[in-house]
Amino acid sequence: MRRLAATVAVAGAALAGLQGTALADPAVPVWQPQGTAVTGAATTAEAQALTAGTTYKDTLKVGDTKYYGVDLDAKSAAYLSAFAIPKPGAKVAYGDGIDLKLQSADGTDCDSFNAHFDSDGAARPVGGYAARTIEKGGQCQEANRYTLEIKRSSAGTSDPGDWPVEIRFLSEPGLKADAKPVPASSATEASPTPVTGTPRPAVGGTSFDTAAAIKSGIWNDKVLPGETRFYKVPVDWGQHAVLFADFANAPKVKDNGFQSAGVRVAAYNPARGHVSDATESYAGKQTSITGQTVAVSFANRYESGSAVSATRFAGWYYFAVSVHPGVKNVVDGPIGVTLRLDVKGAAGSAPGYDGDAAKAGFGVNGDDLAKADGTATGGGSNATLRFVAFAALGAGTVLLLSLAVWMVAARRRPHTADGAPRPPQSPESGYGPPPAW
């Protein structure tokens, strides 16, 4: 009987522990890098070639500088994006992040982009692209082997853990000889008005690939402290997007709680290039961030302003909504977010590509609009999967407990005259296997 009591006590304690874990605050859902595993080289001579239209994943250690090869022709634009994904809540310092550089075979710097954390110290996915733009008189126009360099910067006081990184190479077809793209557009609305109507639920994804597809309208979601959720919006040629991101009030952990740069919205183009971002402090009271893109035009790429230059092609534009991990010291639980989205302007014609731009990932079609229903396109919430796992473990513990009780009871069965245990009887007899669950 002591054995039975001990078995029950141990299994009960295990079950209690699992229940406690399952009921604790769920870990923040994290972007899980997808694609083909690749190992960046230590020198350009050893750099592995990347293929257009393919996504890759690698890991960056503190101080790493890695090289990847890319073969470019003389007529297609190229976009090499990379995003580093530190653990939510990891300690990061101002200046931590990744530096991207695209170089030609002779060492010419074609383009570069630095994706660093701000002084708020909030770990979140950071990245952008380095590009080769086709333009008359520009650098790096010839067909050749080019090299993408990715360098990680981390302060000595920062979390030294590895950073997963997702890399993507997109190739944009050039234009036909008689193509006449519309002029560049840098105008924005002076006082945009938020849309009105009935809100619909949206489930933001953890990455570009799992982003929730939304269109003009009002969308409700919730974001945990330390979490970044992605949403994608189809924006066609000549159109621009206006977004009001309203962050709701929430039950406070303490009075006068405050987090600078507590909420953030960042915009990215179809090639994962950074368009713009904005932040607001958060003190448990409602606040809002407003942002907009300029009208999409092929000629925008030749403009100097990065927010204009990035809106150079039609397709899925992305909004990443982040809540600073320090907000957990301000409020209890997730923050409600209302996205008031308005995609404005009549859809224009493509500029006259000499190739299938849609297949390469640029452009909008009717199917894109049909998919914009607020649900994520793939993957799932880590928190949800974790809950299912713990539930399964809990059920397994109950089953083990039941089996333990049955085994102890089996040892107490009547034995035959030669000492062998009696064969199992029916449940009605008090012995035999446990009933089915």
Image: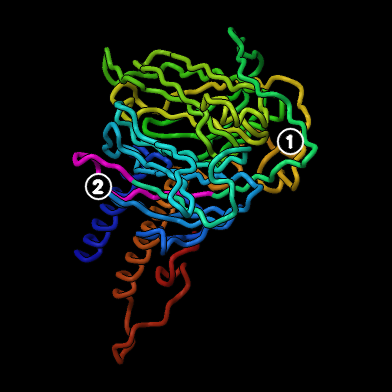
Identify the residue at horizontal 54%, vertical 33% (top origin): 268
Q: Position of residue 305 (x, y in %)?
A: 52, 24
Q: Is residue 3 left or right of residue 263?
A: left
Identify the residue at horizontal 41%, vertical 21% (top origin): 279
Is residue 217 at least partly visible in the picture? no
Q: Residue furthest bottom?
A: 418
Give the CA separation, mark 2 to mark 1: 44 Å
Q: Is residue 337 left or right of residue 123?
A: right
Is residue 345 at least partly visible in the picture? yes
Magenta range is: 152-168
Q: Is residue 77 left or right of residue 28?
A: right
Q: Which residue is mark 1?
A: 370
User: What kind of residue is marked 2?
Assistant: Pro
Q: Relative to the observer, which residue lies in front, 371 or 201?
A: 371
Q: Is residue 253 left or right of residue 427?
A: left
Q: Relative to the observer, which residue lies in front, 364 or 77?
A: 77
Q: Position of residue 192 (x, y in %)?
A: 60, 10
When the figure is inspected, residue 54 is found, relative to residue 362, above or below; the finding is below
Q: Which residue is mark 2?
A: 160
When the figure is inspected, residue 367 is found, relative to residue 342, above or below; the finding is below
